[in-house]
Amino acid sequence: MTGPSEVVASFGDPADNLAFDEALLRAAPEAPVLWIWRNTDCVVVGRGQKIEREVKADVCASDGVPVLRRASGGGTVFHDPGNLNITLVLPGQTNKPLEALGELMTATVAELGLPSRLGDRGLFVGDSKLCGFAVFRTRTGLLAHSTLLVSTAAERVGRYLTVAPADPRPLDSHRSQVASLADHGLRKGVAEVTAAVRSAAAAQLGELTTRKPAEAEREWHRSLQHTRYHYPEWHSEGAQRK
């Protein structure tokens, strides 16, 4: 892989999607990689967050919504099929890891016809957050990923996430009002929004080669499934299987 690429892959289990998300970075690509993906209903907490401070675990259990953990920092998010996830993996190091992702998502939303502004770890339309951002670094590169609320209902997010605790701590989520593209009057399908992401990525990174997962990415995927994402203690406590 000598130029920027878009990897096409989808896994039925949200935990497997999160494992592949991290695998893209661990495989240490030599050029930028884009992955656009969706999950079924789940709640995803940041690497060091405490579930009891972030999630209404009893409601999640009652509704059969799994609570999972990702490798990046940032705040807790709710995923469902109305939420598009965008992963951007960049080789090497940069002092502004969110800049490229912010540029990509700003251009995407502009192409869809909405003015937006970059805020604290996210993209806002008016006072409402449309996209959340998070970053994870290794020695060889960085992974920046974003949610993009296409049609997810704000009340579903509120059903599963707690309000901000009265005793704030550094790793707690910064709660914001959220609104989807649909809430802003843009009744766009996932295919149309995906096309806008691809167009913005090509303008930013150069022409993207579409490809299947590379062998190194598949190997890392299998390894991370074993050590993290198929290990219950990873999701509950952030502990790896040795």
Image (tube, rainbow, N blue to C red):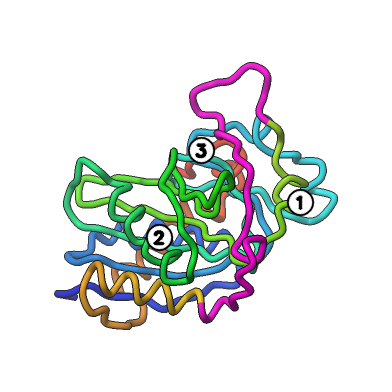
Q: Looking at the image, is mark 3 or mark 2 earlier in the sequence?
A: 2
Most common SS among magenta residues: loop
Instruction: Give above or below for 18 relative to 159.
Output: below
- Which label is found at residue 155? 1
The residue type indicated by label 2 comes to Met
**Which residues are drawn in magenta?**
164-192
Q: Picture quarter containing residue 2?
A: bottom left
Q: Looking at the image, is mark 2 or mark 1 earlier in the sequence?
A: 2
How packed is label 3: few (under 14 Cα within 10 Å), some, or many (20 or more)?
A: few
Q: Looking at the image, is mark 3 or mark 1 earlier in the sequence?
A: 1
The residue type indicated by label 3 comes to Ala
> How far apart are the two marked residues, 2 and 1, measured between alpha carbons?
23 Å
> How far apart are the two marked residues, 3 and 1, measured between alpha carbons?
31 Å
Q: Which residue is mark 3?
A: 239
**Residue 222 in view of the camera:** no
Asked if residue 178 is among those painted magenta in the image, a careful observer would answer yes
Q: Which residue is mark 2?
A: 105
